[in-house]
Image (tube, coloured by chain):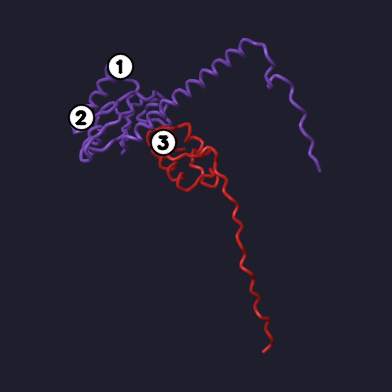
Amino acid sequence: MNGYEFMFILDPTLDDAASLEVVDRVEAIVTAQGGHVVSLKPWERRRLAYPIEGHNEGLYMLCYFDAPPAAITGIRSRVRLTEGVLRFIVLRTDQETRERDQAADIRRRQERAARAAEQAARKQARAEGGGPPHRSSSPGRPAAKESR
Amino acid sequence: MSDRRPMQRRPPRRRSRRRVRINPLLNGVDRVDWKDVDFLREFLGDRARITPRRVNRSPARIQRRIRVAIQRARTMALLPYE
């Protein structure tokens, strides 16, 4: 049995029920091929770096599973044909790396949330006025003369 | 025959090797996670091309991992191709 990291992108326009169906189908594929799903969670709903099948955003799901190596080609081919799955990737990992990645993922999420909250707070404070005027609102410096 | 000047042999020039200063961002980095978009984005230029080692100041080992990670992220539309 080897550890695998598996991420797939769901059609974001599906309603909750349909999305759930697709996810269940994918999970069933893994299990049917002899795999054992360790975790299967939504990862992020985000904008795609380029359009895929006409979509500009997607719902990313991240799954970790263990399976015998012979099962992988079967899983890949079946997932590829699954409606609702726009893209996927299956990679080898091991327990240790998997745990580190999950921890790192959680950490990054927290950092991002903290940064976003800070920015929102700053924006709020600026909107309410007070404090030194923003640099852009004062007349600019005269351009420096060329030295020769 | 006229006299030829004996060939001058120049002393072999020693090439100066300045110590490569490691990119602080890459300090202690061992595993490059293809899912870590924020980290990888630093290594993409304005045309979304992977910046060379010269520019990243990255060790060869890590640059290879960065490249693999970026390519994976690209296939999953986490990073652009262009």
Instruction: Relative to B53, say whether A53 is above or below.
Output: above
Is disc 1 surrounded by few (<14), some (14 to 19) or many (20+) residues within 10 Å?
few
Residue A52 percent coordinates (x, y): 37, 31
Between A110 and A15, the one lying in front of the other is A110
**Which amino acid is tagged 1?**
Asp
- Say above or below: B23 vs A53: below
Rendering coords of residue A131 (x, y %) = 68, 14
Q: Do marks 1 and 2 share a subunit?
A: yes
Q: Nearer the viewer, mark 1 or mark 3?
A: 3
* Location of mark 2 (residue): A31
Q: Nearer the viewer, residue B73 or B65?
A: B65
At label 2, the amino acid type is Thr
Q: Which residue is mark 1?
A: A16
Q: Secondary structure at mark 2?
A: helix
Q: Please tell me which residue is depicted at 26% across the width and 27% down the height of the picture.
A: A83
The chain under label 3 reads: B
Give the residue type that dot 3 points to.
Asp
Q: CA distance from mark 1 to mark 2?
A: 22 Å
Q: In the rendered image of this protein, which colour is used for chain A?
A: purple
